[in-house]
Image (spheres, rainbow, N blue to C red):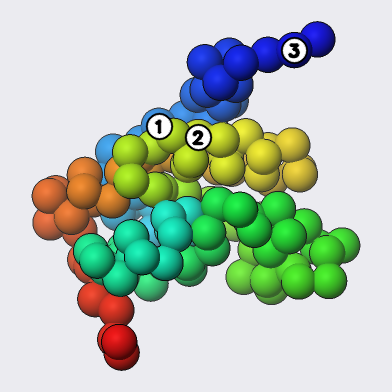
Amino acid sequence: MTINVKQMMAAANAAVPRITPAQAQQMIANGNTLVVDLRDGTEVQQSGMVAGAAHVPRGILEFRADPESATHDKAFSRDKTIILYCASGGRAALGGKTLKDLGYQTVYNLGGFKDWADSGGAVERPTGP
């Protein structure tokens, strides 16, 4: 059965709850939370990222999150709360659905980085060139 992007987004949005920056800040304060920036490197260089977030571009999320992958990132653990964001929330929804498919239970979509920054959330600026 063939599906389209609209259907993929609907399924992802149904599977991954959207949260506000205030809710994300509370989850982060509670601990055992991994915040993941799914944007590409140029986006992060231009605007910075959520303070303390891991930068994992959407195209390699599965490889970093799957414990059986040779490039697994140990920061990913199924017992953590995972908060994903991107530029507008689309990649975060799709990435969250992928993590759910990989067995992660507590996954949230923060939406876009701008929402976080505009709410006064802590931002790290990239260093270097």
Is residue 77 in view? no
Instruction: Identify the residue position indicated by label 2 in the image.
Output: 93
Q: Is residue 105 left or right of residue 26?
A: right
Q: Secondary structure at mark 3?
A: loop
Q: How many marks?
A: 3
Residue at image position (62%, 34%) is 97
Residues at discs 1 and 3 in contact (Cβ within 8 Å): no
Q: CA distance from mark 1 to mark 2?
A: 8 Å
User: On the image, numbered disc 3 is attached to which residue?
Assistant: 2
Position in image of residue 48 (x %, y %):
26, 68
Snapshot quadrant of residue 46: bottom left
Q: Which residue is mark 1?
A: 18
Q: Is residue 46 left or right of residue 82?
A: left
SS class, disc 2: helix
Separation of marks 1 and 3 at Cα, in angstroms: 26 Å
Image quadrant in which the C terminus is located: bottom left
